[in-house]
Image (tube, grey):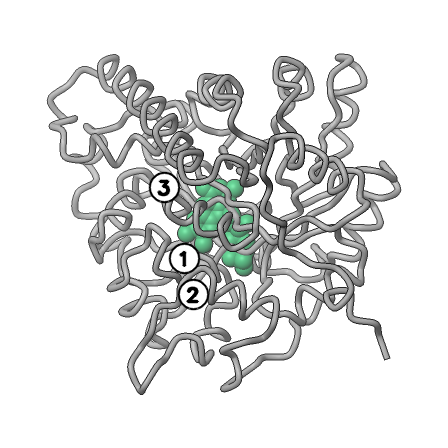
Amino acid sequence: MVKSILKEQSLLAPVFSSEKEKNDYLEAVFSRKILFPIMNGGMGIDFSNEDLAGAVISAGGIGVLAASLVGYNDIFEEKLENMPMEERKKLIIETDKAALSGKIRKVRQDSQYGILGINLMRAVNNYEILVKVIGESKSVDILFVGAGLPTDLPVEMLRYPHMRYAPIISSVRAARIMLKRAQIRKGRKPDAWYVELPQFAGGHLGAGNAEEANDHSEFRPIELYNGLRELDPDIPIILAGGIMYREDIEKALEQGFNGVSCGTRMLLTRESGMSDEIIKEFYLNPMYPVITTMTSPAGMPSRYIDNGFLKAAAKVVVETRKRCVSCIGIKNCGFMNRKTPFCIAHWLSKTRRGLKDGLLFTGSRLDEIRNDGIYSKKGETYIPTIREAIDLMLNNLFSQQTCSPAVAF
Ligand SMILES: Cc1cc2nc3c(=O)[nH]c(=O)nc-3n(C[C@H](O)[C@H](O)[C@H](O)COP(=O)(O)O)c2cc1C
């Protein structure tokens, strides 16, 4: 009989009453004396917003804001097509900065000492500017960077000793590059690895193509764990992708991971930036399959619900191109280079605004969790709160109807 790690150790942080208390706790977490509190994955554009991150923090977890392109929602209604490109570029830089600063402030107003993380895509054009906003705010505890390897961070993070950082990776090779860079440039080693399994995760997937992303044998958590441990015995490792039930968490912790992060489970809550109507109509509706066949404009495979958005996108390609804000740089963008039929900012932002023909990113286990008891009440579809979703994952509450077995790692 395997011992339950969750019975012995909590994945919920205590309430801190000073910066010192929080820092002592984080020191214990990052030196692997205790486990990471449960956390949400960053979900852009603005799905893991201040409400979601705040709710995760107040439930005892690490709340993570998605930072990339958070200002785009604010300029969606602008007549971007009538502006010169340089003006559009300036506009997105200013609105991203203002929106992100506002979100950080809001989380801190509600929770002075909660543990706050920020997720940023390396691929965005104004990445360096946003790292500065995040670092200089002195309000963020952990910076997670994915969608590209943040090889600048070992040196850049020397400027922000109060903040820890965790590259989002799917291979040991990526970790090796980060460590080498830190050594050569005399910079800071990553404080943690955030390992995201492409076969389960939502959004951009860290794999060469869709086939590889769905290949479970390519991304075995235990092999990734052992490889990373061999590289560095001390850096804690967080596992993400397909964590839906207590059994998945137990399994990850048994394998040695020091924490877990959840995307889709946290997305399907009242506090997330996804509208309740879209959750009910698409995410919880078995009529809509999850597919991984599309390469995003950033050149990575991605997983989403097939709601027919590509057909809608194909009708407005020319108009949408005129609205480009160069979010990942025109030369890097599959949409502007006519390889990908949609602009990711435009179609994610539509979803964030509650429009039903937008891009619906999701993890691969959506099909399995749609029937969980947590999503129905008195015969009606029910959207849980973050606290209820966390209760389900840590205690298996609300899942009596169909508690799936642990995913086959
Ligand atoms: C709607 C959605 C948006 C996402 N956006 C981002 C993002 O902006 N940056 C990122 O690093 N990961 C992103 N992800 C990945 C999540 O942060 C998380 O690591 C992943 O979904 C975990 O897998 P799970 O959904 O099976 O729990 C996104 C996932 C979803 C479902």
Per the model, the C-alpha gap separating discs 3 and 2 is 19 Å
What's the amino acid at mark 2? Val
What's the amino acid at mark 3? Ile
**Mark 1 or mark 2, which has the lower sequence index?**
2
Where does residue 6 sit, x and y in percent of width and height?
Answer: 72, 65
Q: Residue at x 28, y 53 (%)?
A: 310
Tag count in the figure?
A: 3
Mark in front: 3 vs 1: 3
Per the model, the C-alpha gap separating discs 3 and 1 is 14 Å
- Is the residue indicated by label 3 positioned so its CB lies within 8 Å of ligand 1? yes
For the residue labelled by badge 2, is the local secondary structure a helix, a strand or a loop? strand
Q: Residue at x 79, y 50 (%)?
A: 225
**Mark 3 or mark 1, which has the lower sequence index?**
3
Judge the density around disc 3: few (<14), some (14-19), many (≥20) Cα neighbours within 10 Å. Answer: many
Q: Which mark is residue 290?
A: 2
**Closer to the camera, 46 or 360?**
46
- Asked if the residue under mark 2 is in contact with the one under mark 1, i.e. CB atoms within 8 Å, the reply is yes
Q: Which mark is residue 45?
A: 3
Where does residue 318 sit, x and y in percent of width and height?
Answer: 18, 35
Q: Residue at x 63, y 50 (%)?
A: 13
Q: Does the rendering let one see residue 236?
A: yes
Q: In the rendered view, tell whether residue 392 sits above or below residue 26.
A: below
- Asked if the residue under mark 1 is in contact with the one under mark 3, i.e. CB atoms within 8 Å, the reply is no
Q: Which mark is residue 304?
A: 1
Quadrant for the N terminus in the image:
bottom right
Name which quarter of the figure residue 88 lies in.
Answer: top left
**Mark 3 or mark 2, which has the lower sequence index?**
3
Judge the density around disc 2: few (<14), some (14-19), many (≥20) Cα neighbours within 10 Å. Answer: many
For the residue labelled by badge 3, is the local secondary structure a helix, a strand or a loop? loop
Name which quarter of the figure residue 94 lies in.
Answer: top left
